[in-house]
Image (spheres, helix red, strand yellow):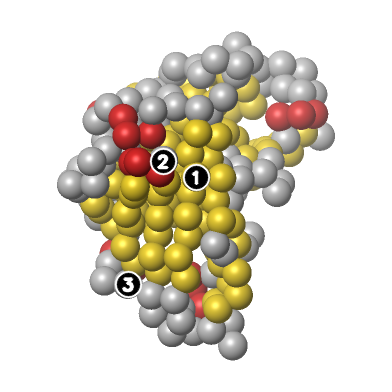
Amino acid sequence: SYVLTQPPSVSVAPGKTARITCGGNNIGSKSVHWYQQKPGQAPVLVIYYDSDRPSGIPERFSGSNSGNTATLTISRVEAGDEADYYCQVWDSSSDPYVVFGGGTKLTVL
Amino acid sequence: EVQLVESGGGLVQPGGSLRLSCAASGFTFSSYWMSWVRQAPGKGLEWVANIKQDGSEKYYVDSVKGRFTISRDNAKNSLYLQMNSLRAEDTAVYYCARELGIAAAGPFDYWGQGTLVTVSS
């Protein structure tokens, strides 16, 4: 099965830039989606198809994907961005063919 | 406004059964693939199953094959998950989620609030 690897935690000071990585074999050839989940809440889609933002998601959220690493970048981090973030891909050759990363806890210092 | 509302969770003994429901509103339910995604306490997200718009294709994660059945009733705008032979490791919050786009493999653009399933004696 296809494996997505995320760092368990990332810490950043308010106003700085946070980068959360998602590693996978040749992930650059796949479409990566990112979700934000706050405690006790359902996940929210924040980036889809590598770099598109759903309506209502601030421009501070951006994404990139190349080679073996996809990255979610959050600029000018705010206290309200503190959450768990998950990357996700579809891989038709994998079983299961929907794969989530293990998640990254973003802490705003 | 798109809404997905799950129900049917609860406490069940190992080996028991439970049927989850997801009531959809605010969009044309019959036009979308739908999925169930679960999250064990303190753990990450795990996709469980999905179903095509007309119910003709269904896919499952290995760990639930032969025990869980996903289905839908487009006339009632509802998604279901029949869970049999439940195990302790099935304990999780179960979310229903809509897949963006007509074809499978889109992102999950809307999620319900989740329903908790606890498998314990």
Q: Between label 2 and label 3, give the one nearer the viewer.
A: 2
> Between residues B93 and B3, which one lies in front from this camera angle?
B3
> Is tag 2's residue or tag 1's residue first in the polypeptide sequence?
1
Residue B58 percent location from the top left of the image: 24, 51
State the SS at label 3.
Answer: loop
Q: In the rendered view of the protein, which quadrant contains the C terminus of chain B?
A: bottom right
Q: Is residue B13 left or right of residue A25?
A: right
Q: Amino acid at mark 3?
A: Arg
Discs 2 and 1 lie in a common subunit:
yes
Q: Amino acid at mark 1?
A: Ala
Discs 2 and 3 lie in a common subunit:
yes
Q: Is residue A18 above or below residue B118?
A: above
Q: Which mark is residue B67?
A: 3
Residue A24 percent location from the top left of the image: 35, 41
- Which chain is mark 1 on? B
Residue A18 percent location from the top left of the image: 64, 26
- Which chain is mark 3 on? B
Direction front: furthest residue? B75
State the SS at label 1.
Answer: strand
Q: Kindly report the distance in space between the C-alpha atoms of the residues bearing marks 3 and 1.
A: 22 Å
> Is tag 3's residue or tag 1's residue first in the polypeptide sequence?
1
Q: Amino acid at mark 2?
A: Asn
Q: In the rendered view of the protein, which quadrant contains the N terminus of chain B?
A: top right
Q: Is residue B16 visible?
A: yes
Residue B112 sits in quarter? top right
Q: Which residue is mark 1?
A: B23
Residue at x 63% of width, y 60% of height? B42
Residue A50 percent location from the top left of the image: 40, 23
Residue at x 44% of width, y 27% of height? B27
Q: Is residue A67 above or below residue A51?
A: below
Dot 1 alpha-carbon crowd within 10 angstroms: few under 14, some 14 to 19, many 20 or more: some
